[in-house]
Amino acid sequence: MSVDLDNPLIFCNACLGSTDPDYQTYNLAVSGVVLAVVGVIGLIGNILVVSVYTHDDHWKHSTSIYLAALAFSDFFLILTAMFLFVLEAWRHHNHPLLAWAYVFGAPVVFPVAAVFQTSSVYFCVAAAVDCFISVVLPESVRQLYCTPRRAKVTCTCIMIICFLYNIPHFFELEKVPCIANDETLSSQICPTDIRLDPAYYAIYYTYMYTTFLAIGPLALLILLNVCVVFTVITKGSESDESDTMSLILVVFFFIFCNFTALLVNFMEIILNNPKILVYFVDLSNLLVVINGTANFFCYLCFGASFRHTLKKVTNSQRFLEGEAEAHLDNERQREDSRLAPYAPLRSETGR
């Protein structure tokens, strides 16, 4: 193999956040095991949430459209997070197939994950605004703004804007050849020159992320939720209070889980100690997945209409399975009825 002296090969561990054995153990436990288990539960839960809120009983309400969009976004956020963090944790422990999948997939999966993380934030904001209008503002305002058509247009616009906002992430990671510990040629994921540019990092990660994905949405969600809670406690609500309470809990849980990511962002600026920071980054990633998973349980425990429709959805699935079994039985009976007349004919000819 020829060596390009202008671009000498790096060692594969040069782009790792930390090679400390204690951290590798922590990373495997948190990202490789706990995040994987929580993620699988979250994938199933969000499929059920989408099934419920796209049901005819709910699809006519604007809030249900926002919550279905949030569950859809959370599903793909969890799926991409499992690819990035679970594979990243296990690929360092003699799993070459996982390492190959991660190296070839990460440059594309990472920006896609960023798109769905952003959309989850703003679908949650949209649901909170919708709840605020429904509970706090006059009925005339609710009838004007809380419509299914407006909700669908809003969700479409959110997805388009989130994709455009995250386009720079598609140019942040690249696959580079490197030298493994056994001195064989391998590949590794490393940040590009764009990602390492101090001005780019300061503007896009520090200021824009903090404004549009951290402090801005969190402050707005806190304000909206406080107003909704105050209205529910003091005046009551014409809407289903159990469903309103489930949405309030979803928003509060979102605030709690994403506040850690904000702390990590500030700690990176203040501490500037990567050896410590990697522990908090793993915890922050886990909390993001927990947040996307916990929404299902908030709806299940506190949403009466959600539970009612969930029973319909699951029972209809059983009904369809029963219909399929009945159809197969009918087909067998028809087949038997076709064969039955030939038996006596054979017996008659045998006389």
Image (cartoon, grey):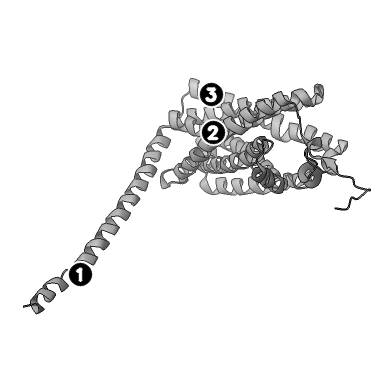
Identity, as a three-letter code, of the amino acid under mark 2 = Val
Observer able to see residue 211: yes
Task: For marks 3 and 2, give the one nearer the viewer.
Answer: 2
Q: Is residue 316 above or below residue 266?
A: below
Q: What is the x, y in percent for residue 89?
A: 66, 35
> Would residue 98 be found to the left or right of residue 3 on screen?
left
> Residue 250 is drawn in which quadrant?
top right
- From the image, tell me which residue sits under label 3: 229
Identity of the amino acid at label 3? Val
Q: CA distance from mark 2 to mark 1?
A: 52 Å
Q: Give the amino acid type for the residue marked by disc 1 in the picture.
A: Leu
Task: Please state which of residues 215 and 175 is positioned toward the viewer in this rendering.
Answer: 175
Q: Earlier in the sequence, mark 2 or mark 1?
A: 2
- Residue depicted at 23% across the width and 65% down the height: 334
Mark 3–mark 1 distance (CA, rounded to whole Å): 70 Å
**Tags 3 and 2 touching, CB below 8 Å:** no
Above or below 261: residue 99: below
Q: Is residue 178 left or right of residue 227?
A: right
Rendered location of residue 302, percent (x, y): 44, 28
The quarter of the picture where residue 259 lies is: top right
Residue 322 left/right relative to 281: left
Q: On the image, numbered disc 1 is attached to which residue?
A: 339
Q: Are marks 3 and 1 in contact (CB under 8 Å)?
A: no
Q: Is residue 349 left or right of residue 66?
A: left
Q: Depth check: 238 or 157 in front?
A: 157
Tell me which residue sits at (66%, 29%) in the image. 27
- Local secondary structure at mark 3: helix
For marks 3 and 1, give the one nearer the viewer.
Answer: 1
